[in-house]
Amino acid sequence: MTKHNGHCLCGKISFSFKGQPLRSTICHCSNCRNRTGSLFSAHIWFAADQLSIDWQECAQYSFETPAGRMMTNYFCRDCGTNLFFRTPLADPLVAVCAGTLIDANYWLSPGWELFCRNRPKFLSIDGTKQFETQPF
Ligand SMILES: [Zn+2]
Ligand SMILES: [Zn+2]
């Protein structure tokens, strides 16, 4: 069952899920770069009721994108690991940061790749459905 689990760096926040992910995304947008501190984000998405999370343990940061969409990041206030994000646009789905999964390779198959116009020149990712910006 460990493959159905994930946690932050310090281990204070852990979560589990049931069933299959509904989608996976990789995103090269500037918001994802800033909020993850990485060159791109990778997420797998679940309906909120597939996830077992103590939301009270997560710190939150909400912001508005240039397109006028609200997003909320959920992270560990002790170690700073980004764990989830939510946006009303995708409600009731929750995006789980793929790097927090114990077995990300098992769950993360190629899905949507967003904001490919920002993809670093040296990087290529096979098998994704690619969009120059985002399709919604
Ligand atoms: Zn932590
Ligand atoms: Zn993004």
Image (cartoon, helix red, strand yellow):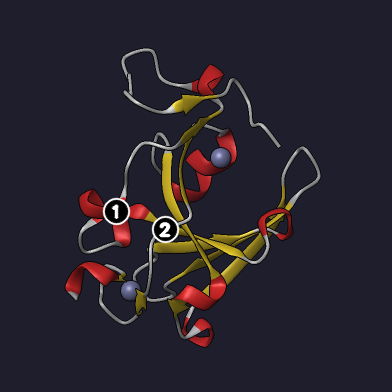
Q: Which mark is residue 21?
A: 2
At a point 65% along the width and 67% down the height, the residue shown is 92
Q: Quarter of the image containing the C terminus?
A: top right
Please indicate whether residue 93 sits to the left or right of residue 27 in the image.
right
Q: Residues within 10 Å of mark 2 (few under 14, many from 20)?
A: some
Q: Which mark is residue 71?
A: none
Q: Position of residue 7 (x, y in %)?
A: 30, 71
Which residue is at the front of the view, 45 or 28?
45
Q: Residues within 10 Å of mark 1 (few under 14, many from 20)?
A: some
As drawn, 45 above or below 34: below
The three-letter amino acid code for the residue at tag 2 is Pro
At a point 19% along the width and 76% down the height, the residue shown is 1
User: Badges 1 and 2: C-beta atoms under 8 Å apart?
Assistant: yes
Q: CA distance from mark 1 to mark 2?
A: 7 Å
Please indicate whether residue 4 sits to the left or right of residue 19 in the image.
left
Which residue is at the front of the view, 118 or 101?
101
Q: Is mark 1 within 8 Å of ligand 2?
A: no
First-in-chain label (1 vs 2): 2
Please indicate whether residue 95 sits to the left or right of residue 128 in the image.
right
- Residue lying farthest top? 121
As drawn, 73 above or below 28: below
Q: Position of residue 135 (x, y in %)?
A: 66, 31
The three-letter amino acid code for the residue at tag 1 is Trp
Read off the residue under disc 1.
107
Report helix, strand or loop for mark 1: helix
Q: How many marks?
A: 2
Q: Position of residue 100 (x, y in %)?
A: 31, 61
